Image (cartoon, helix red, strand yellow):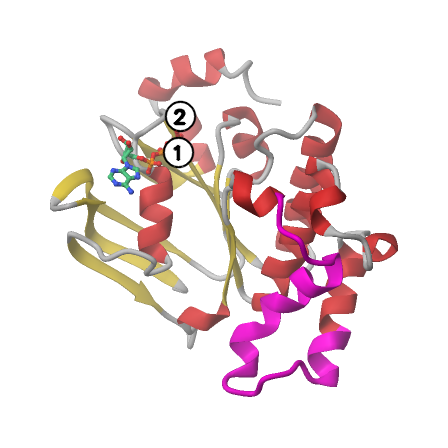
Amino acid sequence: MQLECRDLTVGYDGKAILKNINFSVEEGEYLSIVGENGSGKSTLMRTLLRLQQPLSGEVILGNGLNREEIGYLPQQTVIQKDFPASVREIVLSGCQNRCGLRPFYNREEKEYAYQMMEKMQIIHLEKRCYRELSGGQQQRVLFARALCATRKILLLDEPTAGLDPKVTKEMYQLIYELNQRDKLTIVMISHDLRAALTYSSHILHTGKHVFFGTKEEYIRHARHKEYIKAAGGIK
Ligand SMILES: Nc1ncnc2c1ncn2[C@@H]1O[C@H](COP(=O)(O)OP(=O)(O)OP(=O)(O)O)[C@@H](O)[C@H]1O
């Protein structure tokens, strides 16, 4: 496995929000984390990234995966939307973990950043200022940045929040391609259960009843029928 949670309890100030979570992600899998608002999805993801400490239990990285090799696309904040840097600078900053103490980006990193911008179809925006871009364009920039940080696993916190249906679909397609073609492991928080059931291999449902299993197991489980119906059924 690439990532595993053992009896993980997450929360703030000693107060648990999600308790005794157990799941693992193998290379090349696509895990969607779904569940009610406030059920602790973002808190869990921040704990996986060690941006905060677990209250108890463990997050284990396997198959030679280092913390620095995890790509992360956070929920966009208002401050980020106003960031006064060029697209190229922001994408390149995804390579920072590779630089170590070196205070500049080398040729290979610049080339890789260019490739990721190509992949995200934002080369034409390279010199533009980030804050002047549309929400969908900004999301592609942050996506390219997250890809610069990893060749193995990408964690995404609601990457389609605030995007229109067309851009949302493109984004899902892109993530799916990265998973299928580039064999990138995906762990994604999503409010769109229908999309999650279309693209993922596994589902973690947070809330009162926690579920972890394959997509097929999720669909078969009687408790989920109502959620699936409310989300408009399965595509
Ligand atoms: N920094 C913080 N300090 C204390 N409590 C927090 C903090 N951040 C979030 N919480 C609380 O933790 C709970 C879980 O929040 P979290 O953002 O993890 O949920 P979520 O499932 O991602 O929600 P959503 O689907 O609305 O994005 C909420 O009750 C929230 O108010």
Label the magenta part by its dominant secondary structure: helix
Dot 2: what SS?
helix
Q: Which mark is residue 220?
A: 2
Classify mark 2: residues with Cα within 10 Å, few (<14), some (14-19) or many (20+).
Answer: few
Dot 1: what SS?
helix
Residue plotted at (51% across, 41% down): 77
Amino acid, disc 1: Glu
Residue plotted at (30% across, 31% down): 39
Residue plotted at (73% across, 57% down): 87
Amino acid, disc 2: Arg
Q: Determine which residue is flagged by label 1.
A: 217
Is 106 inside the magenta-drawn segment? yes
Residue plotted at (57% across, 40% down): 159
Instruction: Look at the numbered discs 1 and 2 and tell me whether their residues touch, using CB distance below 8 Å.
Output: yes
At which x and y percent is residue 139? 66, 44
Quarter holding the C terminus is top right
